[in-house]
Image: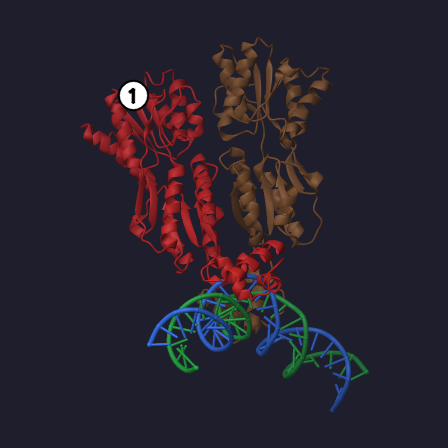
Chain colours: A red, B brown, C green, D blue
Amino acid sequence: MATVRDVALLAGVSPATVSRVLSGRTAVSADAQAKVLTAVKALDFQPNSMAQGLRLGRGTSVALLVGDIEQGVYAALTKHIQNALVELGLDLMLFNLGHREERLLRFLERAPSLRLRGVIIASSDVMPIAAIKAALLGRGGLLLSVGQKWQRHGVTSVVQGDRAAVAGAVRYLIDQGRAPVAYVGRIAGSVPGSDRFAGYRLALGQAGLAVDPALVWDVAYRYGAGYEALSRMIDAGTAVRGVQAGSDELALGAIAAIQDRGLRVPEDVAVVGLGNMEFASHTRPALTTLSEHPELIADKVREIIRSAEEGRKVPALSVIPRSLIRRQSA
Amino acid sequence: MATVRDVALLAGVSPATVSRVLSGRTAVSADAQAKVLTAVKALDFQPNSMAQGLRLGRGTSVALLVGDIEQGVYAALTKHIQNALVELGLDLMLFNLGHREERLLRFLERAPSLRLRGVIIASSDVMPIAAIKAALLGRGGLLLSVGQKWQRHGVTSVVQGDRAAVAGAVRYLIDQGRAPVAYVGRIAGSVPGSDRFAGYRLALGQAGLAVDPALVWDVAYRYGAGYEALSRMIDAGTAVRGVQAGSDELALGAIAAIQDRGLRVPEDVAVVGLGNMEFASHTRPALTTLSEHPELIADKVREIIRSAEEGRKVPALSVIPRSLIRRQSA
DNA sequence: AGCCGCCATGAAATCGTTTGCAGGAACCGC
DNA sequence: GCGGTTCCTGCAAACGATTTCATGGCGGCT
């Protein structure tokens, strides 16, 4: 592989000049510039990123800590964020946590060695922010969270407006005469979860309704959990005419349970999901849900990283609004 | 951040000794060993991976080129491969190609700088293998392909036995009296695609049946394509009693089209998918499909990388068998 | 004409790690 | 007691880029 030395030799200049031409942050004569450039072409020179990293004291990779890449939400986020990073000339190092602490510990162990440019957290789990900060060890490394706010710990966050969105959807259900409305989704131990639930409470409060514990199910974001929650409610004879689910998977499970009990969606029970996963428009009935905007989140992330690199101040919290996508289930 | 120099100073030895203790490939006295280790602990020393990479002439990251991380197959593969790499002490650098050439070009441009330890291709698209080989520039970098064989170009491949699996499934359909059987999926421009179709042809041949062009649909792996293919066949009055789809998405689209035409699955038309995506067991009817084993692929990948690092020879092609998962749709 | 300042350039130090080489100590067998 | 191993250790040279510092040349100004 060619080095700057080789290029310098061929171009008849010093390595320093080669570096200057390539980095472009110092004035270089047009003559030298041309010679270096042709030499670079001729040798197909590619600077060694590890040598650059060593000298500059920082790498070019950003770690993405993802809750579970198999979940559609995270996959979409990952895709768009990778894209954004490419545009910034950065590399994405993926760490799939699978919601398991052991994986996180392994990351924390390895991270300091990597001299990361930044860490992006995309996980609904509770995180040891202080430890992560330590793992990217001073050096101005950027730490940001997507999909979940960690403002309290001073982490720049980009989130979607879950509370307002859920509140709007629940209000919509109530307006359509779908009260009593149940809430099915994670509540404790998850920041977005409690945010969503807060939206539910807010809407109920505004409508002058009380929160009925029999209608609130704190469960994991899984199809089976939605199925079970609705099965139990119906079997127990709980009156329920509307459901706000914390995710589309939950909503689809809920719909299946309702239909299995011989009830119709949305006539007997209306269901609203959250996340607008691809499959949601293909189900029968097609799912009414709250939109998801991974591409807008990624745009924001790109903007924030760029600002930070240029030393500008970045907003501690950016909120991307969700909107209600009305299909057939509500 | 502490360096080996700091550790050496504190331990009262030379940097060389520190390095030797840490790498463990040269004999070091028990005394020195102990002193170094306590110093490392005390300073919380973490070797700078970029300096190591520079000195050793190779990095610790493996690039994963993925067709589209949003597709469940790739997400699962990514997850398990990341896992395998962690166990090998390697880092996963993700490049989502999104089936777009421009992305691939960007990768090829950036890759040589990264001094990658290896490249893993997980994409059903046709790839410029020679260019990728050039991008990891000699240096013994490993190139391997998962899910698709590229033996002809000398690329180590780990695949699932698509041809045999599809042949078995089609034979099963015929045995159940589901002939004529249609094939819906990608055929041209995709190695796994043509492999799957070869299985279809094989089974028909063995049963003494001819391939009827009206029953073969070369379409993309998307829900809508499956829907359209079946809609057209039925609307055209083509006799069809069984369907082998090239993916679960296609199969689900096909089922929806069949049901929309007032026919029943599997009584009137039986459908077999491929991939066993998570949602496949939750549909009505539950999807009969061919299994997918990303974890076994990843195991194989781990084994291959380990072998290669130790200088042992690796098999050019490893095949993981798929099996038929019988549910309700066939 | 002489002086000052600016601009482009090169030499050399530096980032943090690994390793070839050589030297010194200890130990063996004779 | 001595030559020959063996074993451990330190010195110093890499790896490949960037940047500080110094220098030489040049034009502009008085």
| Residue ID at (52%, 70%) | B36
In this rendering, is residue A257 above or below A99? Answer: above
Image coordinates for residue A312, horizontal then vertical, percent: 33, 54
Task: Report which quarter residue B322 is drawn in.
Answer: top right
Crowding around mark 1 (Cα neighbors within 10 Å: few <14, some 14 to 19, many 20+) is: many
What amino acid type should be assigned to the residue bearing mark 1?
Arg
Residue B87 left/right relative to A259: right
Image coordinates for residue A275, horizontal then vertical, percent: 38, 32
Image coordinates for residue A208, horizontal then vertical, percent: 18, 28
Residue B96 left/right relative to A226: right
Chain at numbered mark 1:
A
**How many marks are shown on the rendered structure?**
1
Residue B112 left/right relative to A259: right
| Residue ID at (57%, 8%) | B237
Image coordinates for residue B266, horizontal then vertical, percent: 55, 15
Task: Report which quarter residue B26 is drawn in.
Answer: bottom right
Task: Report which quarter residue A78 is drawn in.
Answer: top left
Point out the residue furthest to the top here.
B237
In this rendering, is residue A214 above or below A130? Answer: above
Specify the quadrant that holds the C terminus of chain B.
top right
Where disc 1 sits, the SS reads: loop
Q: Which residue is mark 1?
A: A241
Question: Which is more toward the observer, A60 or A15?
Answer: A15
Question: Which is more toward the observer, A289 or B26?
Answer: A289
| Residue ID at (45%, 27%) | A279
Specify the quadrant that holds the N terminus of chain B.
bottom left
Residue B205 shows in this picture: yes
Point out the residue furthest to the left here.
A208
Residue A124 shows in this picture: no
